[in-house]
Structure formats: structure tokens, C-alpha cells
């Protein structure tokens, strides 16, 4: 009996896949098909897969061509499978020609001509093309435009900005740039907002009123009440409203939260998060400096995330020590906020005028989590215990600082109509409440 094996993602199964499976089967008597696991796809940069693993497995089974279906979970598994199943022939489409020659050591390798004119990414493109408008002045928008190229079904089609000259060629070549927010809203399905935080509430509200989906850099408003109002409006209109805090969409960060919720370190008693980056604003013209966000917004929102997502929003008390850039006290250079919860404590350090170790430490009754700097670009964390033999290390690929995963989650939410809860509404509102208190000088101590 000649055993054949082939592998694939088989997302939105199409006739190109079916023809490949048929020809694979014709190479032998028994066909094993390996369907790639979600995490394995993410690791190899396939971030736009639409269907769940089980849906894809069922689709392959439904063809009736495969004699056995297995899951491909890790790099190098092909060699293990060829040995484990006693495979004679490994086959895959010609888009991989040469890539699996190393398997010749274990069995025969056959590349089958790929079927032209059909691919899962094209199917994904046609299914949900969301035209996205960018809003704001920040260089950060250049990154969004770049990262959007990795995401199926979303294309940046225009920008509303007051400083086009400072933005990338790619953004200038978008073909549509305006200073009129209304004009932009007329031309897009959704907006990505990275303007000054003071502008967020009005811009989010107008977009929702005009029936547009919104991905807004947190804070989406500067008061809890305004944030709740926006959430309500989005719900009423059946629109997607998401916080753009890229860390929340990183696989490693999301998995870390799940492990902690599952009691991996016992009860969480303390969260210490630090996010700093030094920005030299010396001699910068006010307009240039104005394009940058203050530390409380730039880093406060990210540093607050693990505190609010692990300990909740009902802290008993909070104090916030702040250092200003200058005697005008308009721009904070560093802040340290201490929270006391009924059964836990937390500390957030954030700043663009003071440098510190950007780590995250989460302490529990059985162990602790250590996320090395820059923790907010989360791809690795350790769980440490009293007995080091029990320590565990976790790594999840993170490409492009995590922005592309945020855009994929947004595109999926727009397509399915299901909100993504990477940043749940309660945490989102609590971030806005913190900003409200900060601006009102509540619980503030100046240093
Ligand atoms: N295929 C094809 N014609 C197409 C599209 C895909 O022949 N128009 C083939 C691919 O070459 C592959 C199989 O169908 O052999 C599954 O394709 P994908 O789902 O895109 O999977 P892929 O990412 O190519 O995975 O470890 C994974 C494998 O290495 C291949």
C-alpha cells in the first residue's frame, strides 16, 4: 500500500484544493491530509485565515478524498509524520517547489502543478473588503498603512490629516487625502483614529452617527460617561467600536491572560506594568511636539490594560504621582499610579520623559509571571515558581509589533458583526475614567 501525505490550511475550501487532493490521492492508495492548526498558521504569518480549524477539517473530510485527516501543529512535524505513518510520498502544490526537498531524505517528494486563478486570499478579499480611512497626524499612521497590507479584506483608501507632508509616500499615494473629516466619512466604511485624544469623542461619535465602524486608539474619550455613550451608540447602530491597544491583540498577551484566569499562579495579588520611551522634545516646534501624544495617553492606556483586565475596574483607591515636562504643566513626562483593590494592588509607570525597564510582573499566591521589556510587544513570557524546575516559558510569534493582528480582529468583527473583546467595554470605560481623573487632577500628586 502506497501511503501519500499532503498538508494545507484549506481555508474556504475551493476547487484548487480539491484538484490537489484528487491528484495527491492518485499518487498512491492511502491519502493522509494534514490540516494546519490556527497557531501554526499564525507562526508562519498566515494571519487572515477565516475559518476555524474544525470547519477546515470538516471541509476536507467532506470531499471524501482523504483516508485520514491529521492536524499540523508545529514546524518540522512533517518529518515526524512521515516516520510515524510510514509515508512513501509527500506532495504539495508547485507554489512550494524546492521548499520541501529536504524531505527527500525520508520519502519521495512530488510537487503538483498549482491550479491558477483561485486562492483563499482572493476569496477572502472578495468577501469582505472594508475600506478604511485613517484619521490623525501621527507618524504612527504610516505603520497602520504598512501593516494593513498584510491583512486580507481591509484596504486603506484615504486619510484625514492636517499634516500630509509629514506622512509616508504610500499614504500620500493613497489617492485621497483631506482635512475634512466629513469628506473622509463619505468615502469609507470604517475609520482608524489616531488623532489627539481630545478629538476622539467627537470623531468617534460622528463616525458612528454616519454608520461607520471605528477602531480608535485608546482612550476613545476623556470621560467615562462619553465612552459609555459611544458604546451605547455603536450597539444601537450595530456597528463595530474597538479600542486600538495593539498589545491586547498579541497572541502571547491573550494567552497569558487565559493562563492567569485559569489560576496558573494562584490568586493574582499584584500587577506591576511599566511603559516608557524617551522622546526628545527639546527645541521641537510646538506643532511638531503637538503631534506627539503625552505619556499618560501614549503609554498609560497600555500599562493600565493588564491591571484592569486581571484585577477589574473596581479599585478601592488610587494615587497618581506626576512629573510635568515644564512649569506650564501641560504635558506629563512621567507618572506612577498606585491602585489598591479589595484583595490586590497594582502599579502603573508610564512616561515619555523618563526611561525605565519596560517589564511586566504579575505576582500570585503560587507563582509569578515575568514579561521582559518591551512587554507591550508581547511574544514571550515566563511563569516562575518557588521551585525553578516548575518554571515555564511561552513564545508566540509577533510580527509587525502586533498591529496587523489588531486590523485582522477589526476586519473579522466588521465581517461577522461580532464585537472583538480583546479590550472589553468595561476596561475601555475604565481607561477613560482614569484619563478623566488625571485631567481633573483627582488623586494626583505632583513631583
Ligand atoms: N493549492 C493549489 N491550487 C490553488 C491553491 C492551493 O494547488 N489554487 C494547493 C497548495 O499548493 C497546497 C494545498 O492546495 O498544496 C493547500 O493550500 P493552502 O491551504 O494554501 O495551504 P498552504 O499554506 O499552501 O500549506 O504546511 C502547510 C503546507 O506546507 C502547505
Image: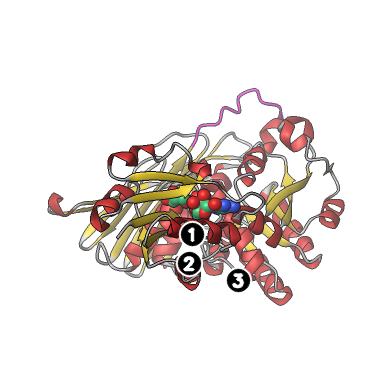
Camera-side mark, 2 or 1: 1
Q: Which mark is residue 21?
A: 1
- In depth, the one of 365 and 384 nearer the eye is 384
Mark 3 Cα within 10 Å, few/some/many (few <14, many 20+)?
few
- Label 1 C-beta lies within 8 Å of the nearest ligand 1 atom: yes
- In depth, the one of 265 and 411 nearer the eye is 411
Q: Which residues are magenta?
A: 277-285
In the image, residue 94 lies in the stretch drawn in magenta:
no
The residue at 64%/44% (across/down) is 149
Q: Which mark is residue 205?
A: none
Mark 1–mark 3 distance (CA, rounded to whole Å):
34 Å
**Residue 271: image x %, image y %?**
35, 56
- In depth, the one of 75 and 43 nearer the eye is 75
Q: Are marks 2 and 1 in contact (CB under 8 Å)?
A: yes
According to the picture, the residue beneath numbered tag 3 turns out to be 418
**Residue 106: image x %, image y %?**
28, 44
Residue that sits furthest to the bottom in the current view: 236
Amino acid at each position: 500500500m502506497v501511503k501519500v501525505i499532503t498538508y494545507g490550511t484549506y481555508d474556504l475550501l475551493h476547487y484548487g484544493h480539491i484538484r490537489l487532493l484528487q491528484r495527491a490521492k492518485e499518487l498512491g492508495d492511502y491519502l493522509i491530509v494534514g490540516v494546519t492548526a490556527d497557531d501554526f498558521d499564525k507562526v508562519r504569518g498566515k494571519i487572515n485565515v477565516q475559518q476555524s480549524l474544525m470547519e477546515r477539517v470538516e471541509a476536507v473530510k467532506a470531499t471524501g478524498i482523504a483516508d485520514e485527516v491529521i492536524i499540523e501543529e508545529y514546524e518540522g512535524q512533517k518529518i515526524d509524520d512521515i516516520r510515524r505513518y510510514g509515508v512513501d510520498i509527500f506532495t504539495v502544490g508547485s507554489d512550494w517547489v524546492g521548499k520541501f526537498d529536504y524531505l527527500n531524505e525520508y520519502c519521495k517528494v512530488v510537487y503538483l502543478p498549482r491550479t491558477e486563478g483561485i486562492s483563499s486570499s482572493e476569496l477572502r478579499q472578495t468577501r469582505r473588503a472594508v475600506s478604511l480611512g485613517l484619521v490623525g497626524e501621527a507618524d504612527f499612521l504610516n505603520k497602520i498603512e504598512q501593516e494593513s497590507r498584510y491583512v486580507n479584506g481591509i484596504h486603506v483608501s484615504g486619510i484625514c490629516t492636517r499634516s500630509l507632508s509629514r506622512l509616508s509616500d504610500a499614504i500620500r499615494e493613497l489617492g485621497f487625502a483631506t482635512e475634512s473629516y466629513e469628506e473622509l466619512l463619505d468615502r469609507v466604511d470604517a475609520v482608524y483614529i489616531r488623532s489627539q485624544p481630545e478629538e476622539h469623542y467627537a470623531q468617534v461619535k460622528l463616525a458612528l452617527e454616519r454608520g461607520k465602524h471605528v477602531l480608535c486608539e485608546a482612550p476613545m474619550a476623556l470621560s467615562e460617561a462619553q465612552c459609555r455613550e459611544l458604546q451605547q451608540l455603536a450597539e444601537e447602530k450595530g456597528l463595530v467600536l474597538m479600542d486600538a491597544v495593539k498589545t491586547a491583540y498579541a497572541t502571547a498577551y491573550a494567552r497569558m491572560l487565559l493562563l492567569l484566569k485559569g489560576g496558573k499562579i494562584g490568586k493574582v495579588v499584584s500587577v506591576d506594568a511599566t511603559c516608557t520611551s524617551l522622546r526628545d522634545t527639546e527645541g521641537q516646534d510646538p506643532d511638531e511636539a503637538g503631534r506627539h501624544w503625552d505619556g499618560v495617553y501614549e503609554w498609560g492606556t497600555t500599562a493600565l490594560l493588564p491591571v484592569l483586565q486581571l484585577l477589574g475596574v473596581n479599585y478601592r483607591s488610587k494615587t497618581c504621582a506626576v512629573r510635568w515636562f515644564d512649569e506650564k504643566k501641560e504635558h506629563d513626562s512621567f507618572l506612577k499610579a498606585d491602585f489598591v483593590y479589595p484583595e490586590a494592588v497594582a502599579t502603573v509607570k508610564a512616561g515619555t520623559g523618563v526611561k525605565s525597564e519596560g517589564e511586566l510582573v504579575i505576582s500570585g499566591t503560587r507563582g509569578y509571571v515575568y514579561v521582559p521589556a518591551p512587554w507591550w510587544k508581547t511574544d514571550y513570557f515566563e511563569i516562575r515558581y518557588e521551585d525553578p524546575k516548575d518554571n515555564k516559558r511561552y513564545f508566540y510569534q509577533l510580527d509587525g509589533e502586533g498591529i496587523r493582528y489588531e486590523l485582522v480582529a477589526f476586519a473579522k468583527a466588521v465581517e461577522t458583526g461580532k464585537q472583538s473583546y480583546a479590550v472589553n467595554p468595561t476596561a475601555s470605560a475604565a481607561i477613560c475614567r482614569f484619563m478623566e481623573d488625571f485631567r481633573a487632577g483627582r488623586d494626583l500628586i505632583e513631583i
